Amino acid sequence: MIEIDHLVKRFDDLVAVNDVSFRLAPGEVLGFLGPNGAGKSTTMKILTGFLKPTEGTVTVFGCDIERDTIAAQRQMGYLPEGAPCYDEMTPRSFLKFIAAARGLTGGEQKRQLAKVVGTMSLEGVLDQRIETLSKGFKRRVGLAQAIIHDPQVLVLDEPTDGLDPNQKHQVREMIRGLAKDKIVIISTHILEEVTAVCSRAVIIARGRIVADCEPSALERRSKYHGALTLTLDEAVVAADLLGAFAGLDEVGLVEASTTANQLTLFPRDASASILLSVSQLVRDRDLAVTGIVQEKGRLDEVFREVTSEAGL
């Protein structure tokens, strides 16, 4: 496993990381979140051996990142933000180069190359210059180089940033497949990434951990958890239907969004569902509602809340 104990990093008078501790086991996918300047990138650089901590320790499957840096880094695969590659190379030549740098030769190199090419579906672009590839394929090549040596730990920095919805889905499916027997750490500012891929979320602010739990637990902290969002027919003004739902005993508050032409209904009892009674009212009164969504909770709201509590 990965063990991070009482990690501190100072830059002169600036404390970038302030007593951070957590542990990760194989099978966990961690979403590591934080606002700009929170200490997230510094923590990641210490974890991967690019920076030395001022205090504290990091061990990767028993290898201390300071004393046994190379041994610890052998256990890791790393995808930097933007998936930088050598544009003039092809995926085939680039992956062979990375495999050789990782110490893979002969039959072992061929087997691992074939494995990652299949996993990332790169067969059709293997001999195409990397500079000509789409963002999605470049990200796949980046993931392929990160896993070619079959590491125990994957560290992915903004793995889907800048991709279109289809490309994001493909990369996330690949990450889910890879995470079955590995530790995966995803550093991201895209909050939907956490609910889409991660089994655990850590939020850091002012160098300290301010939340460490499952994404669903973060969603339950949102005021929108259990609320219903109703999308109305474009011929109806949201404010005109406020009174129709305000009279329901189970509904404690109704908010109208004129820009989205939606109503959000909050239950009076946070532990109770209002879906049945609201749906019944819509049918009985034939209200111009085109869609009803039960909210799990909004991570952006929780993120603002926990980081604001930390003084950001």
Image: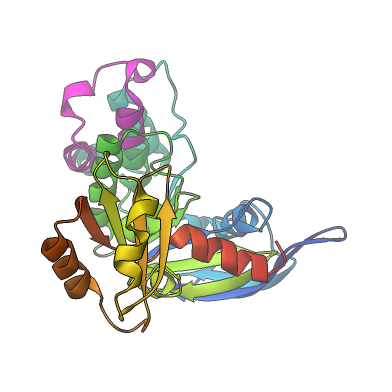
Figure quadrant of residue 51: bottom right
Figure quadrant of residue 203: bottom right
Question: Is residue 206 found left or right of 91 in the rendered image?
Answer: right
Residue at image coords 16%, 39%: 118
Give yes or no for residue 68 being in the magenta stretch.
no
Magenta-tinted stretch: 111-140
Residue at image coords 30%, 80%: 250
- Residue 22 spot, x, y in % from top left: 52, 75
Classify 2 as above or below 98.
Answer: below
Quadrant of the rendering where the C terminus is positioned: bottom right
Classify 44 as above or below 214.
Answer: above
- Residue 59 spot, x, y in % from top left: 53, 70
Quadrant of the rendering where the N terminus is positioned: bottom left
- Residue 199 spot, x, y in % from top left: 34, 67
Mainly helix, strand or loop, the magenta region? helix
User: Can you see residue 93?
Assistant: yes
Classify 65 as above or below 134.
Answer: below
User: Can you see residue 66?
Assistant: no
Front residue (pair 309, 166): 309
Residue at image coords 25%, 43%: 169
Q: Which residue occupies the extreme right position in the image?
A: 13
- Residue 190 spot, x, y in % from top left: 45, 49
Figure quadrant of residue 56: bottom right
